[in-house]
Each structure stands twice: as structure tokens, then as C-alpha cells.
Image: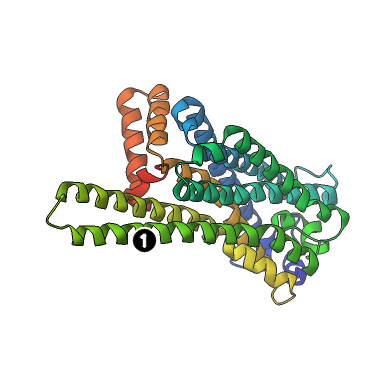
Amino acid sequence: MNSSFDANQSGSSLFCLLGVVDYSHNLDTCMLEVAIILFLAVLIIAGNLVVIFVFHCAPLLHHHTTSHFIQTMAYADLLVGVSCLVPSLSLLHLLRGLNEELTCKMFGYVISVLKSVSMASLACISVDRYIAITRPLSYTTLVTTCRLRLCIVLIWVYSALIFLPSFFSWGKPGYHGDIFQWCADSWKTNPRFSTFIVAALYAPAALTVCFTYGSIFRICRQHTKEITQRHARFSSEGNHGERGERCEGCTDKRYAMVLFRITSVFYVLWMPYILYFLLESAGLYQHAVASFLTTWLAISNSFCNCLIYSLSNSVFRKGLGSLFGSLFPACLGCAISLIITLLFVCCLGPASGYFCSG
């Protein structure tokens, strides 16, 4: 994969994947790579620290069952950001004393496990919302705090186990470690291991999300249709009550749209990585720059992942305003909170406040 890279970088002391393409004689591609990784690391760490602090400062957020999974994702993504400092130091040759093969395998394994936790948490959130809509009366008895904690423990244990065979030379879990030369040159993907990862993680998570959100959309559509039919049948009676039911149907529809938009962000950022992983595992396409771009595009999801989920909750936005208000003067804190809220509404639409409803 790096034969062209070796020719281009024969006179360079640094190894970097972007070096396979000679963008410009005046552009140091290795430093560009370091800058990209450090920039993402700072964004991920800062964003998830804000989410964690707000959850600790806003006790009302803990009333929603999804908050347990959101906090799990926040801690996992925070560790992703901290781990991103490792390849940056390696690119700057500040980790020369470490065993490159062990460091490469350990870094790739840790990142893979953390992203698996995020993916599994998204699937669990979709199941939680599905139960809340399909069984609203028995929801509190089905989804208990004890079961939520057990589910989170199982997510971490399962994620740690499915990538463990990569340590025993069965295959390569992903391209996160390709920032190290040993990973890029000597650690090859294995079709069987890649198939195992897809079957054990990617496919079940994606199918679960598609089924649950598809069912939510179908239920909302059916509910809206029933309200419309009742309104047409009794148009001359109970206009006020029908209007209230119609608004309730709109709320369900907006809620489903918010779920769809939020989940789409995750899969839009991860789909190029998964597709490239499958293509290279099958021996159909290989390119160092493609592996770098798809990998760090997927990792960038750690910045927007929890923020998007949490900012869709009006209680979280109030907690965010309180946090900024305690750190800055009152006027400045309110202004920052208002700006963040407006930006979020512009990105996800006016339905953002309905995420945790139901």
C-alpha cells in the first residue's frame, strides 16, 4: 500500500500517510497530518468535556433513560480524543522509546473498542425510544435503572471481546493505527476477521437502528392518519379537541424526524470508513490517503456525536446556559447559550426540543 510512499519520502525522517501524494513542494504533508489530528483531538476533548460537565451540573437530565447512554458515549468519545494525542506524538517522533508494533496494536484496539461502544450505545438508544413509543404504559417497568446499568456494562465487555482476536494475529480491526509505519506496512486486513466484525458489530447495530426508527416512523404515520380521519369524520364537532390531537400527532412526527437526523450524522460519517474497510479486506481497493481520510472522518464523529444528542434536549441547553453563566458574567453566559441554541436549531430544525419527549 505504501510503495509509492516510500519513493516520495526516502529523504524524509517522518512517516505519514498523506506523503503518498505530492500535493506541493511547499507543503509539509506530515505536519499537515499532525495538524489535522491535533485539531480533531482538541475538538473531541473540549466538546465531550462540556457534555460531561453539563450532565453533572443539571440533575434533571438524569430523569431521561437515554442520558445513561449519552454519558457512556461522552466518556468513550472523550477517551478517543485523548487517544488521538498518541499518533500526534508519534508523528513528531516523541515516542521513539516505545515498541512500535505493540503501540500500534494497542492504539488500534483501544480506538476500535471505544467506537464500538458508541455504535452499540446508539443502537441501545434506538431500542429505548422504540420501547417508549410502542409500550408507553409498561415502559417504566421494562426499562429500569438496574437494567440500564447492566446493558452499559455488557456494551463495554462485548466491545472489548470482539476486537480481542486482533492481538492474536487473526486480522486488523481498522486503520486507526496506520499512522504508525508498522501498522501501515505489516498489519494487513483479513477477510475472515473483517467479515466477523461486520457480522458481530456493524450489521446488527445498523439493522437495529433501521428497524426501530422505521417502526417509529410507521407508528407516527399511522397515528397521524387516524387523527386526520377522525378530524374529517367529526369536523363539525370537538374542533378544539381535534386540534389538540393533531398537534400531538405533529409532535410524534417531529420527534421521529429528530431521531432520524441525529442518527444519520453518525452513519454518514462512518459509512465511508466501513465501505473502505470492506473493499480493502476483499482486495478490491487500497490507498493510504483513502484510509487516512475515512478513518479520521469517522473519528471526527466523536466531536459531534454526543453534542448533537444532548443539545436536542431543552433541559441540556438550560444546563449549558447555567454552566456558562457560572463561568462568565451573566450577560456573556446568556449570549453564548443563545448563540449555541440558535446554531443547533438552524442545523437540526425546530423539532430539536422534542428529542426526549415521550
The residue at the point 73 percent across, 54 percent down is 177
Estimate the x, y position of residue 18 in percent, counting from the top left.
65, 62
Residue highlighted by disc 1: 222
The residue at the point 36 percent across, 61 percent down is 222
For the residue pair 46 and 59, the one nearer the viewer reads as: 59
Marks counted in the figure total 1
Q: Residues within 10 Å of mark 1 (few under 14, many from 20)?
A: few
Estimate the x, y position of residue 48 in percent, counting from the top left.
54, 38
Image: 329 above or below 313:
above
Is the C terminus in the top left, top right, bottom left or bottom right quadrant? top left
For the residue pair 357 and 348, the one nearer the viewer reads as: 357
**In this image, 32 relative to 129: left or right?**
right
For the residue pair 183 and 77, the one nearer the viewer reads as: 77
Estimate the x, y position of residue 330 in percent, counting from the top left.
32, 23
Image: 51 above or below 19:
above
The residue at the point 69 percent across, 39 percent down is 153
Image: 315 above or below 197:
above
Estimate the x, y position of residue 131 in percent, counting from the top left.
51, 48
Q: Residue furthest left?
A: 236
